Image: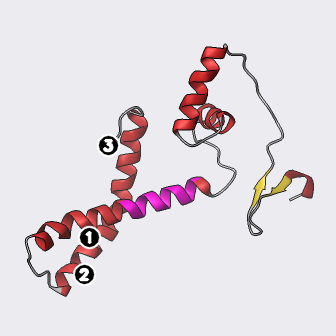
Amino acid sequence: MPESTLATTEHANEVRVAKTRTIGIRVTESEYLALQREAYERNQTVSEWGRNKVLGGAVSHDNADGLSKHIFTELVGLQLLLMNTLPALLRGDHIPAEQVVSINKQVQAMKRRKAQELLAKRAQEPDKWF
């Protein structure tokens, strides 16, 4: 890839494609404040938030989106594991090792599908927290 199209970040191993094209819209001050508030609620700049809204997540220039989905999938797996083991543990029951292995296999088999279902539900109803 030509050097002019790459920009390095603070991390030595991380390289991302430079954003060289712009689009613009004019908004009122109150509209900008509303956009800014929306972006800051998501820990993003107005530019990042706007880019995500315009592109709809269709284009990703780095691995952040993939990493976020991976992390989310692992969190869903942890939640499933806890939901399947914690009630018995809180009752003081002993869970045999074979059963823990079985539960873990079930969680590994379903965590990706469950994570995708939650993300799809979130995309359909973005203003609701699940």
The numbered disc on residue 106 is 1
Q: Residues within 10 Å of mark 3 (few under 14, many from 20)?
A: few
In the rendered image, residue 119, in percent from the top left (x then y), is placed at 41, 46
Depicted 115 relative to depicted 50: above or below: below
Q: Quadrant of residue 55?
A: top right
Residue type at tag 3: Phe
Instruction: State left or right for residue 117 relative to residue 21.
Output: left
Depicted 27 relative to depicted 39: above or below: above
Q: Residues within 10 Å of mark 1 (few under 14, many from 20)?
A: some
Which residue does the image show at 30% across and 61% down from the upper left? Answer: 79
Q: Is residue 119 magenta?
A: no
> Which image quadrant: the N terminus?
bottom right
> Which image quadrant: the C terminus?
top left
Residue type at tag 2: Val
Q: Residues within 10 Å of mark 2 (few under 14, many from 20)?
A: few
Which residue does the image show at 57% across and 53% down from the upper left? Answer: 65
Q: Quadrant of residue 39?
A: top right
Q: Which residues are magenta?
A: 65-75
**Sequence order check, earlier mark of 2 and 3:** 2
Q: Which residue is mark 2?
A: 101
**Residue at the outermost bottom position:** 97
Instruction: State left or right for residue 18 relative to residue 4.
Output: left
Secondary structure mostly taken by the magenta-highlighted segment of the chain: helix
Q: Which residue is mark 3?
A: 130
Residue type at tag 1: Gln
Q: Could you tell me how far apart the alpha carbons at marks 2 and 3 are, in whole angstroms?
A: 28 Å
**Sequence order check, earlier mark of 3 and 1:** 1
Q: Could you tell me how far apart the alpha carbons at marks 2 and 1 are, in whole angstroms?
A: 9 Å
Label 2 element class: helix
Which residue does the image show at 80% across and 32% down from the upper left? Answer: 22
Q: Is residue 66 magenta?
A: yes
In the rendered image, residue 109, in percent from the top left (x then y), is placed at 32, 68
